[in-house]
Image (cartoon, rainbow, N blue to C red):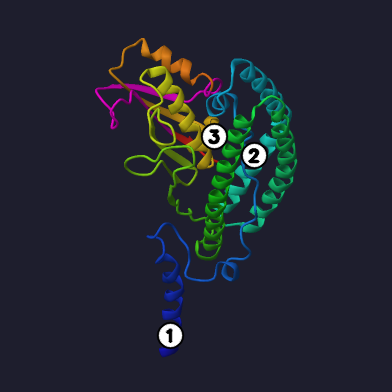
Amino acid sequence: MRHSLKYLFLAATLLLLPCAAWGQGGYRGGLSQSSRYGPPAPKLPGVELVGPLDTALARVTLTLTPDQSTRYRQVYDSFMVATRPQRDSANAAIAKMNERLDDGDRAAAMLYAEQLQDLGKYLKDRQDRFEGDLRRFLNGDQSKAYKKWREDQDQATDRKRRENQRRWDEAGFRGEFVAPGAAAPEIKTALPTPPGVAAPAVGSPSVRVGRAVYVTGQLGVDSTGMLVGSDLRAQAERAFANLRVVLQSAGASLRDVTTLTIYVVNYRPADLETIRTAGAAYFSANAPIATVVGVQSLGRDGALISIGATASAH
């Protein structure tokens, strides 16, 4: 009987130690990750899976002239069409990989991770060539601005890789402690503010729960928190641009958005066309559900519009 109690105590200790870390930013585990749950997470591709700076955001970020905007759109569209099969295959591999991770099957997930790595090498080579060609029509300041955007994206990718490591660790935890067929718990993760976007006054810019991404209402402000203009059109364009950046940092994209909630100060029916025009560059086909609500004011003096979203990430 004494031996049975001893083994029962040890088993309870093993079960309780990992769970004690849940309340401090997600499971980190009280045991060595590399020895307890296997090797570290594979290094997966980053910004190349999404593609270069899109035309709408490039026009604002790089301060392109109309002629430059036209040329940028031509080379960008050509690039995205040429690489669409690889990016679609990569997105399918991500979805399958995450399904296996949610089931706690790291070995099966690794097979899809290896496919992603191969696709990432091809896409990175193509994107490097695309970005090299930009020097033909961008000036020095614009090239620096693009380089800064790319560096910010790479930093966001590094943060995403750290989150990815946690997901692989959690898969090991599920595979070890969750009974076969049992539903795996969905982990809530508050994500940091990505570069290029002002931090919200309250709360997190986005929260991820499983594959669902919730983005707080984005205002028409630049990275320093200054309003980009006093008219609805200018603020709406910037708010949509900020929304795209936050989604990307959370591992989602505009095409993953399922619902939009748009608050407009002193809303009039004529404002709907202004909002639709501002968002046309971001939402064309396969548009999400959108709700427009008129309000008396927002949390920032002078702000005219706030755009929040819910998305289904890969």
- The residue that label 1 is drawn on is 6
Q: Which residues are magenta?
A: 282-309
Q: Earlier in the sequence, mark 1 or mark 2?
A: 1
Left or right for 48, reference 217: right
Residue 314 pos. (x, y %) = 56, 41
Q: Amino acid at mark 2?
A: Leu
Q: Of circles 1 and 2, which is in front? A: 2
Q: Earlier in the sequence, mark 1 or mark 3?
A: 1
- The residue that label 2 is drawn on is 49
Q: Earlier in the sequence, mark 2 or mark 3?
A: 2
Hey, which residue is sitting farthest front in the picture?
A: 140
Helix, strand or loop status at disc 2: helix
Label 1 packing within 10 angstroms: few (<14), some (14-19), many (20+): few
Q: Amino acid at mark 1?
A: Lys
Q: Nearer the viewer, residue 220 or 311?
A: 220
Label 3 packing within 10 angstroms: few (<14), some (14-19), many (20+): some
Hey, which residue is sitting farthest left in the picture?
A: 296
Q: Is residue 199 rendered magenta in the image?
A: no
Q: Which mark is residue 208?
A: none
Q: Nearer the viewer, residue 89 or 224?
A: 224
Left or right for 166, reference 192: right
Q: Amino acid at mark 3?
A: Ser
- The residue that label 3 is drawn on is 253
Residue 229 pos. (x, y %) = 39, 22
Q: Which image quadrant is residue 303 in?
A: top left
Label 2 packing within 10 angstroms: few (<14), some (14-19), many (20+): many
Q: Gap between marks 1 and 2, in whole Å? A: 51 Å
Hey, which residue is sitting farthest bottom in the picture?
A: 2
